[in-house]
Image: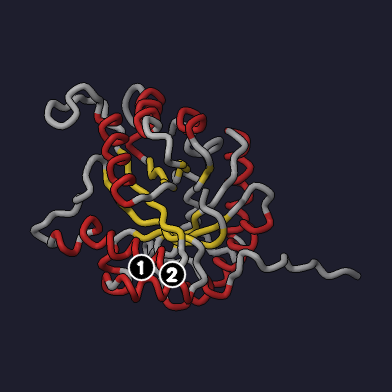
Amino acid sequence: MLEGKGAMVWQLRNWQGGDAQAQAQQAKNLGLAWVSIKIIDGRSETWENPRFVPLARQNVSLLPATVAALRGAGITVAGWGYTYGGVYRATIFFPSKTIAQQEGAATVVALARHGIVEYQIDAEKEYRKGFNRADRAEAYCLSLMEDSRFEHSLCSYRFPKTRATDFPTHAFAPYMEAWSPQVYWVLDNRLNGGAAQLEVCAAEHQRVRPLPMTPIGPTYADRGWRARPGQLKLFFEKARSLDRCVGVGVWCLDQASPDQLVALAEFEWDDPLPVAPTD
């Protein structure tokens, strides 16, 4: 499981210009215990159009140097990837597997190539549509479980019991070692908006299945909104205060603003919780 303070990365070329040593130095300066990098999209490790992004600048090419540099700095490297959970069968690479199963098999190959053990499953809207949503989720997970070396956490909707009730959280749950929900409080401008949403999120996930949790907060911009440093601070502190939270992170490091990075650097997972004043 992802323990302590960390961050997710989407496009390595946009994190410190793709310079592996600069990436490791920044992660160390931020005090990160772990960094989770996108390694696959569906079945593909080269998901970006090479007409616009040369292969040499895609994650698949930049990963080896980044992984080595981060590990050399004593930082745990995790992976994350998107799953579409398709229902149709293909006939070329994995002729006997559904697309969901193919995605799981391709992910195992990518994880093994980089020696990554911890994996965050980014499953979203595709699993809220069509038939057999739970069956597709289970098929994907069973394909991942064919290799027992890896630990998996579900990085998906923050409110499985009250909002994303059509998402098959319960089908993923038996195969997870941890939760890693996307607590993206976009457009919630309350100072404690992220902290308040995290408290509800944690309670709902524990009702699905009691597991360790590493929630993920937002640093990206959305419709002119961006999480403020003070909101991030309270979000991080709330995570540290919750019994089953073992860590906290953000998505994503390559889109974080300078003031957000300061908030991330100033928070220490191992610091004692603030003591409430007494009369």
Q: Estimate how packed mark 1 is, as few (under 14), some (14 to 19) or many (20 or more) residues with alpha carbons within 10 Å.
A: many
Q: Amino acid at mark 2?
A: Ala
Q: Estimate how packed mark 2 is, as few (under 14), some (14 to 19) or many (20 or more) residues with alpha carbons within 10 Å.
A: some
The residue tagged with tag 2: helix, strand or loop? loop
Query: Which residue is label 2 attached to?
Result: 73
Residue 95 in the image, given as x and y percentages of width and height: 17, 24
**Mark 2 in CB contact with mark 1 (< 8 angstroms):** yes
Residue 51 in the image, given as x and y percentages of width and height: 8, 58
Q: Residue at x 59, y 61 (%)?
A: 235
> In the displayed structure, does residue 271 sit left or right of residue 252?
right
Residue 266, quarter of picture: bottom right
Query: Which residue is label 1 attached to?
Result: 69
| Looking at the image, residue 164 lies above or below residue 115 | above
Identify the mark at residue 101; answer none if there is no mark. none
Residue 170 in the image, given as x and y percentages of width and height: 50, 29
Residue 241 in the image, given as x and y percentages of width and height: 68, 57
Residue 211, quarter of picture: top right
Q: How many marks?
A: 2
> In the displayed structure, does residue 122 sit left or right of residue 237?
left
